Amino acid sequence: MTDPRRDIPATDAALADPRLAKAIDLLGRPLVKKCVLAAQHKARTGEIKPESVIDEAIAALPMSATSMQPVINATGVLVHTNLGRAPLSQAARDALLMAAGTADVEFDLETGKRATRGRGALAALREAVADAGGVHIVNNNAAALLLTAMALAPGKEIVISRGELVEIGDGFRIPGLLASTGARLREVGTTNRTHLRDYQDAINDQTGFVLKVHPSNFVVSGFTSDVPVRALAGLGVPLVVDIGSGLLRPHPLMPDEPDATTVLRNKANLVTASGDKLLGGPQAGLLLGDHDLIEQLRRHPAARALRVDKLTLAALEATLQGPPPPVVSALDTEVDIRRAREIQRRIPGARIVESAAAVGGGGAPGVRLPSLAISLPAELAVRLRRSRLPVAGRVEHGRCLLDLRTVRPDQDEALVAAVLACM
Ligand SMILES: *Cc1c(COP(=O)(O)O)cnc(C)c1O
């Protein structure tokens, strides 16, 4: 009897199989080879037959050369940090793909000379917030705060209310971030109440700026008070306001969420915000405000270390200029019952339930958005998460809920297919 292991195809012979050769063109040789080696191993241990090695390797091929997988967000949390925050609009995706090649990111095609990097995105931002005398774009809001502290308070004090010492997430805290620049925090007031005189008493020739941080991921209620932007603007030192979410104008559903335009009209000198929360764009930090302060930030040596990629610039400009991104659409449109019924009709045993979606991502913590969810047995939640096109739902009262407010209507087809495949 011959050893069946002798029939296991050699690695190079397997890689020459036309289907695997095609996969090498798409995924690269190392990834495909890994799948072949794993299949050969299974054949050696007798788990599969030697003649199945190539089929086994093909079945194990990843869908792309990145291990990151697309996930349908059926959690009902519009800006889900663990799912990459804001999904981009089609216009922003197209722009990003264009910029992925060589592009005129800092090249003037008229003159053939060097041009301002990201001038299109900067102009779009200035146009979107006409009250800003200057604008600058960095990696994220944390980078915007870092640059502000480095440029405006080196060796000086940043005056901040004790009610606004916020932990952003994953253990990162705004006070720690600011202190890492060498600036000193001058905390004023108490957790629940801070008054104008607390700020006035703290300001002296050591003050770099006053910082007001929007407590975006929690609500303090009861016996509370804080000082409005307009009052803080008259203290004779720069006023920086971290609004968090990136709303550029007021939104009727979120009356307590600060927006850049209103904050600047109330005479803040500088506003910082994220690009990938309620603005619905790519990860970015937006800096808007007094022209001279923005110039000071832009010229700071560390600005280069915080500058954004061309992909971000392209996607941000397209988000600002193009059609509303998914986060904005999900905010502004309620789920159509006919859409929910159509999905229910195609999934045996599915029910429709009323649901409350949330803004998430550290934004508008008290706001509940009416929504509809497809209700399924709880055990489907795990299977859906592990399926070929993963779906993230939420488990509530012993049921797996797929909240439709965060599923784009053009994903309904894929959602139904994923559920049916799991049943
Ligand atoms: C989210 C948030 C940040 C952090 O923003 P990133 O863009 O994630 O760096 C900072 N401040 C506030 C108020 C926030 O809500």
Image (cartoon, rainbow, N blue to C red):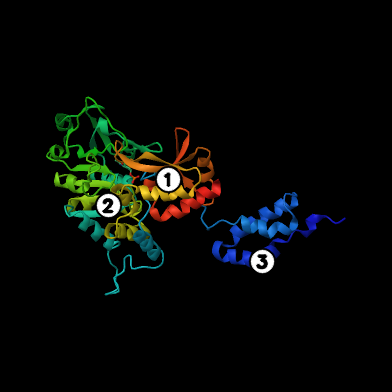
Where residue 23 sits, quadrant-wise, is bottom right
Measured in 3D between alpha carbons, the distance from the residue under mark 1 to the one under mark 2, in whole angstroms, is 42 Å
Where residue 37 sits, quadrant-wise, is bottom right
- Residue wearing tag 3: 17
Q: Is residue 414 above or below residue 196?
A: below
Residue 300 can be seen, yes or no:
yes
Residue drawn where x is 22% and y is 51% of the image: 288
Whole-percent x, y for residue 370 in the image? 32, 41
Residue drawn where x is 53% and y is 38% of the image: 379
For residue 134, side relative to residue 100 (left or right):
left
Q: Pick whichever of labels 1 and 2 is earlier in the sequence.
A: 1
Eye-nearest disc, 2 or 3: 3
Whole-percent x, y for residue 55 in the image? 67, 59
- Residue wearing tag 1: 74
- Residue wearing tag 2: 300
**Three-letter amino acid code at the position of disc 2:** His
Q: Residues within 10 Å of mark 1 (few under 14, many from 20)?
A: many
Looking at the image, which is closer to me, 51 or 16?
A: 51
Some atom of ligand 1 lies within 8 Å of the CB belonging to the residue at label 3: no
Q: Pick whichever of labels 2 and 3 is earlier in the sequence.
A: 3
For residue 316, side relative to residue 68 (left or right):
left
Eye-nearest disc, 1 or 2: 1
